[in-house]
Amino acid sequence: MSTVLEKPVIDEFGVSRFVLQFSPFIEMSDEQFSDFCQANSDLRIERNSRGEVIIIPPAFTETGAVNFNLVIEFGIWAKRDGTGKGFDSSTGFVLRNGAVRSPDLSWIRLERWNALTDAERAKFAHICPDFVVELRSRSDNLQKLKEKMQEYLDNGVALGWLIDALERKVYIYRPGAEVEALENPAEIAGDPVLPGFVLDLREIWS
């Protein structure tokens, strides 16, 4: 099995992403993909629904700081609420369409999480989170992120936030509803999926 490394597309910030294709094409099983990720543990890796392996560059430093604050705010709520389990950006989930995605932040209701076996939890679990956040970095193409958010929605997410700190916009995704775009909001609320959770965006924008 040989590997073809597609020519990267350079975005406006001079950052590229690579898509690995295997020639002749071979679709890796979940176990093979898990082994591939473990063998390349220094990389952040996803897989799209076509079976292509995507190597994602690390977030720039400013975005990492923003994501840290986001995780803290959400973590405080999640611990107090106690109805679900939160996950950071290093967590991979296998969606119904076969893609393996790693949201910047995600949350699953406890009854769904507890329904998984220990063996299922030990690998990339076959489950779509109830709530996901994607935070746009300077290394991210906005259109690609929007497509990823739609993919989450198509695969069962109940609430999704795409936070674009570069343009100070938030895109809210809900099943059966048009995408809501907010310009420079001071805060956003997670009701009814995340009852009582309000994200203060002033630190995100600063």
Image (cartoon, helix red, strand yellow):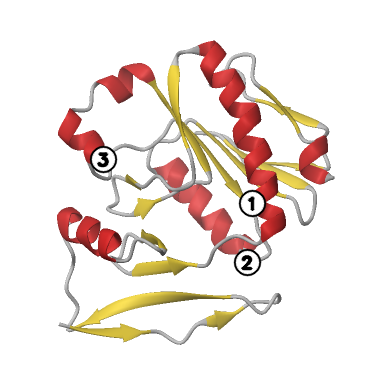
Residue at point 70%, 75% (across, down): 13
At mark 1, the secondary structure is: helix
Give the alpha-carbon distance from disc 3 to disc 2, as whole Å. 28 Å
Q: Amino acid at mark 2?
A: Ser
Q: Are marks 3 and 2 in contact (CB under 8 Å)?
A: no
Q: Which mark is residue 126?
A: 3
Q: Residues within 10 Å of mark 2 (few under 14, many from 20)?
A: many
Residue mark closest to the camera, 1 vs 2? 1
Which is nearer the N-term, disc 1 or disc 2?
1
Tell me the quadrant of the picture where the C terminus can be found.
Answer: top right
Relative side of 46 to 184, left or right: left
Residue mark closest to the camera, 3 vs 2? 2
Residue at point 76%, 47% (across, down): 169
Viewer-side residue, 3 vs 143: 3
At mark 3, the secondary structure is: loop
Q: Amino acid at mark 1?
A: Gly
Residue 164 on image: x %, y %: 71, 51
Residue at point 52%, 57% (across, down): 147
Quarter location, residue 43: bottom left
At mark 2, the secondary structure is: loop
Give the alpha-carbon distance from disc 1 to disc 2, as whole Å. 12 Å
Relative side of 175 to 184, left or right: left
Residue named by callout 1: 64
Q: Which mark is residue 122?
A: none
Residue named by callout 2: 139
Q: Amino acid at mark 3?
A: His
